[in-house]
Amino acid sequence: MRRIGMVVSVAVLATFLVSVVTLTAAAQTNTANSGAQAESSGPPLSQGTVTGASRAELRAIHQDVAQEEQLPDYSQVVDNANSGRFDAQGWKRGGIDGLAHGGGFVSAGPDTAGDARFKLKVPTKGDYALYAWWPAREGNAKAARFGVESAGGTRWTEVDQTRDGGYWVQIGTYEMNAGDRYAVRISSKGGSGKVIADAVALVRGVASPPPASGASSGENVYSASSTVHERFAVVWFGKKHIGTPYRLSPPAPCIAYAKEDCSCFTKLVFRHFGKTLPDSPITQYWHHGRWIAKSHLKRGDLVFFKERGWRGPITHVGMYSGNGFVLHASSYYGKVVNSKMKYVRGYFGAKRIRHLN
């Protein structure tokens, strides 16, 4: 009997251990899957309305942006025609194009040896936004490589130059050291199609708009053709709101250039063009415009997000501004900014307001 009892005890113990191991493995698998789901659904914090950040984290972010605003405004534009600030050995000068900055540009194919370089003056160490301008053409490169000399080394970004031409396109935001040097390079290697080097603009801070598109005496800012699509004009007008303080409405009133949340911002921009939108991201999505696939986004399209998860309500709306960026009133930054769309959690869909090209 004792032997039988011992055998039964050993069998029960073995079964128990197997069960523990199985449950532990299952728990690890579930944890891994949960982590994968969280990772695939977007960043841990969202730069939209429902940020997921603590008050202390938001306070630190807002203080950082406020410190940038205390510095004097600074921007510099360098066109390919600026002698002494542009160099592109072996690149070919293109013809006159109405959507080129200053009317002209240079281009290169994959077999061109050297890079095009822009010399920029960075007055003080800090965060700067870099914009570029090019005329969009069918034969342009879909993966033109822009290299920016940041404080942490050269950072490369690929840009589709078949799109978003004739306007300032944000390449990225970089921490840069002070100095006057060739800080931006455009490479034609490793791809196909013609890479365009036209003009770049450096602007201080992450919450500052790009330079005006009109002519200016002193800064060598040139204007492109006045004939632009309405969607470009919508984005240009939207960028005039950059820096406006974020306030949730309601309860706060929706006041242009004073207090704007995400849907208030889009409502005010489209009202300027005679289009009526409600101050609600949910209503804007379900009752206005036509659905657009993410792969077909154009400037001026509205993009919507469910930051609390797919089953939750739409919590945020912004305006696509080209090259993966979105113009939006951000609770994260505490104001209207132009930032990377991938940093807003839970992309849900896009709408194109009627009568926009």
Image (tube, grey):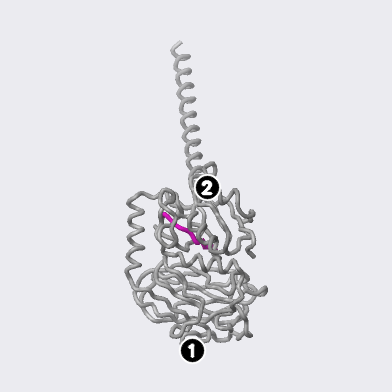
Of residues 218 and 345, which is closer to you in this image? Answer: 218
Please state the horizontal and vertical placement of residue 244, each as a whole percent of the image: 41, 62
Picture coordinates of residue 322, whole percent (x, y): 56, 65
Position of 191 relative to 65 (above/below): below
Q: Which residues are magenta?
A: 324-331
Q: Which residue is more in the foreground, 277 or 69?
A: 277
Quarter containing the C terminus:
bottom right
Whichever of callouts 1 and 2 sits on the residue coming sooner in the sequence is 1
Q: Which residue is mark 2?
A: 314
Label 2 SS = loop
Horizontal side of 285 relative to 129 (left or right) equals right
Picture coordinates of residue 57, whole percent (x, y):
35, 53
Q: Which residue is mark 1?
A: 83
Asked if residue 333 shows in the view, the reply is: no
Could you tell whether 349 is left or right of 75 in the image?
right
Mark 1 against mark 2, which lies toward the viewer? 2
Q: Secondary structure at mark 1?
A: loop
Residue 80 is at least partly visible in this image? yes
